Amino acid sequence: MRFSLTALCLVVWCTLAAAQNTTDLPACATSCLGIALERSTCAATDTACICQDKPLQASVQGCVLQSCTVKDALVTQNVTATSCQAPVRDRSAKFNAISISLGAISTTVVAFRIAYQHFAAPTSLGRDDWFILLLLCAGLSSTFLNSFGFVSNGIGKDIWTVPFKNITRLIQFFYIQEILYFAQIALLKTSILFFYMRIFGHTDIRKFIWGTMIFNAAFGVVFIFIAAFQCKPISYYWTSWDGEHQGHCLDINAIVWANAGITIVLDFWMLTLPLSQITALTLHWKKKIGVTLMFCVGTFVTVVSILRLQTLVAFAKTRNPTWDQFGILTWSTIEINVGIICACMPALRLILVRFFPRILGSTCQGTSDLSRYYVKSASNTGNHRSRRHFGTESHARSSNRDRGDAESASSDGPEGVSQGIMFTKSFNVDFHDETRLVPMKSLDSPSPPDPTHSKPQGAKDDW
């Protein structure tokens, strides 16, 4: 990609002689400065006037861009900026801090999720867990590139202050990061979709989840392939900036905009999948709100994706890439790490419920109103639903022992006439927190009746 300069601070030969050697300025730039100075009202020794004369700057800028190579133009900008004492800008430390912090947080939440699933949960690691592990590995690779590839090669600085070899290296790392980003987006959505499959795999929405998963896989593979082979030869991606090499590339702006647009649309679609099933769940309305809010956490990723769009306006056409592409790298880093954190939120809640049951879990002893909060009792119909939760459990045991014998059975009626069969019934009721959500099949379908609790014909319950 070719880079030109937006502004060139001017300085005359006498000013350059006082500041540094005139040999530091390319010959093409020296000629442009001399021509512009002849038409300027600034004195040759008035450095402040020369540096602030915008018409003069514009005249020299056009001349340098036509007469000088990209490298000569960068040297001219560096020399004149130094002579005019322009401030040196550097945001690399800020970028490094954001990348490392988010990488550490993402690693921590994934470690807690996998440790809980492996050691505390009765089920083994699911496919959603394996994909989140793959995503974390790709994310850590990006964090490593951010610190040792981008920061050390000039990201967050003005391009004319960066050595030429560092510019080439930085664009090479950007090529790798672009491929990693497309792969990370696909892995993140795959992990979430497999999580949906564990929850809603028994419902009619299963086919929509599989369809979305196939589309997401194809979407990811296509963009990874395009990113890898967008230039011919491939090396032209990181050598084209100086204008000294031959080759051609696809419109990278069109590629990143297409990817961003499809990603946002897919985010909204994936949000509608679980929300469409909430009303069908046999849960208390308060629990439905909680489940809805849990799924809506994923909108944070969509918000970040939308905010990232502003950095794509002049992605490939920037004239100061080491400075301007700070934004897209920062927002891409935030987007991936926020996605990892949001994907682990359900597991983090289970961990908190397990260790802080009185605050986040459910506790019921005996008979209380809390049981009606978790289970809509269907005592009139005889339907009972079982809830299983892998955090703290509470058990309510109800026992009704009606003691009777043949003597009590005949005491209130005619002799030899039985008033009914008296029997003893014991049962256990387990109340659990449904926000585990996996599996949810038991929440939507009543448990089959227990044949051992069927009563003989003509018998009655004595409560």
Image: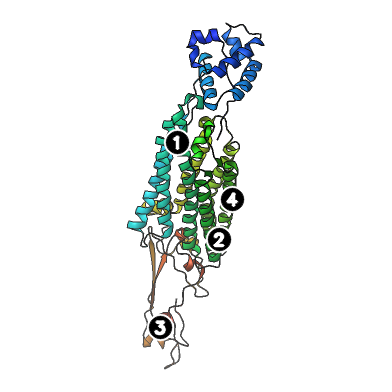
Residue drawn at the location 61% of the way across and 14% of the way down: 52
Give the Cα distance between marks 1 and 3.
Answer: 72 Å
Give the Cα distance between marks 2 and 1.
Answer: 36 Å
Residue behind mark 3:
422
Q: Is residue 126 above or below residue 78?
A: below
Q: Dot 1, how many residues are within 10 Å of its Cα: few (below 14), some (14-19), or many (20+)?
A: some
Is residue 58 toward the left or the right of residue 389 in the image?
Answer: right
Question: Disc 2 vs disc 3: which is toward the camera?
Answer: 2
On the rendered image, what quadrant is the N terminus found in?
A: top right
Q: Dot 2, how many residues are within 10 Å of its Cα: few (below 14), some (14-19), or many (20+)?
A: some
Residue behind mark 2:
278
Question: Disc 2 vs disc 1: which is toward the camera?
Answer: 1
Q: Position of residue 40 (x, y in %)?
A: 65, 11
Point out which mark residue 453 bears. Answer: none
Residue behind mark 4:
262
Q: Secondary structure at mark 1?
A: helix
Give the Cα distance between marks 4 and 2.
Answer: 26 Å
Sequence-first disc among 4 and 3: 4
Sequence-first disc among 1 and 3: 1
Do the CB atoms of the residues marked 4 and 2 lie less than 8 Å apart?
Answer: no
Point out which mark residue 98 bears. Answer: 1
Question: Disc 1 vs disc 3: which is toward the camera?
Answer: 1
Residue drawn at the location 61% of the way across and 24% of the way down: 66
* Quadrant of the rendered image containing residue 34: top right
Question: Disc 4 vs disc 1: which is toward the camera?
Answer: 4
